[in-house]
């Protein structure tokens, strides 16, 4: 699943030469100068211009989705103890799946 900001990024055309996945550190794949999205919601989200899309090559892997969910939960939890435990789980998932 693509969740913007978690291994998937939409940028202005040619704003970045390359990006690394903020979840697993892999170099993202890029599609440049994609056509503008059409429709009211896209315009409201300022997606009515050409764009570049960067996506992690591991985005569709089950372990990557698990890592994304852990990162999102770490960001949400008010508990420092739970965050530390989840951070350890995240590190385990990433270490088990290094490419």
Image: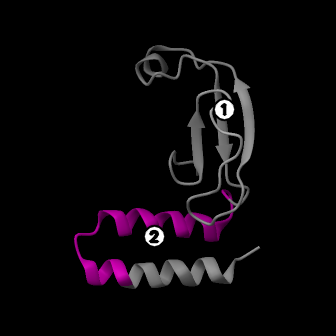
State the image coordinates of residue 90 (x, y, percent, origin top left). Answer: 51, 77
Splitting the image into 4 quarters, where does residue 60 fall? bottom right
The residue indicated by pointer 1 is 52
State the image coordinates of residue 26 (x, y, percent, origin top left). Answer: 70, 62
- Asked whether the residues under the numbered discs 2 and 1 touch, taking CB atoms below 8 Å apart as contact, a structural biologist would say no
Disc 2 versus disc 1: distance between alpha carbons?
27 Å
Mark 2, Cα crowd under 10 Å, few <14 / some 14-19 / many 20+, is many
Q: Is residue 65 left or right of residue 89?
A: right
What residue is rendered at 66% in x and 57% in y?
Answer: 59
SS at badge 2: helix
State the image coordinates of residue 52 (x, y, percent, origin top left). Answer: 66, 32
The residue indicated by pointer 2 is 70
Name the foreground residue: 99 vs 68. 99
Q: Is residue 6 left or right of residue 24?
A: left
Name the foreground residue: 12 vs 86. 12
State the image coordinates of residue 28 (x, y, percent, origin top left). Answer: 70, 51
Name the foreground residue: 5 vs 18. 18
Residue 12 against residue 22 in the figure, above or below? above
In reply to whether residue 93 is colored magenta, the answer given is: no
SS at badge 1: strand
Mostly what secondary structure, the magenta segment? helix
Q: Which residues are magenta?
A: 59-84
What residue is rendered at 58% in x and 36% in y?
Answer: 10
What residue is rendered at 62% in x and 66% in y?
Answer: 24
């Amino acid at each position: 699943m693509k969740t913007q900001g978690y291994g998937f990024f939409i940028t202005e055309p040619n704003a970045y030469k390359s990006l690394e996945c903020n979840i697993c550190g892999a170099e993202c794949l890029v599609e440049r100068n994609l056509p503008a999205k059409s429709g009211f919601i896209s315009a409201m989200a300022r997606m009515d211009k050409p764009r570049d899309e960067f996506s992690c090559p591991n985005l569709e892997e089950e372990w990557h989705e698990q890592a994304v969910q852990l990162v999102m939960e770490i960001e949400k939890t008010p508990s420092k103890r739970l965050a530390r435990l989840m951070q350890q789980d995240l590190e385990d998932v990433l270490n088990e799946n290094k490419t």
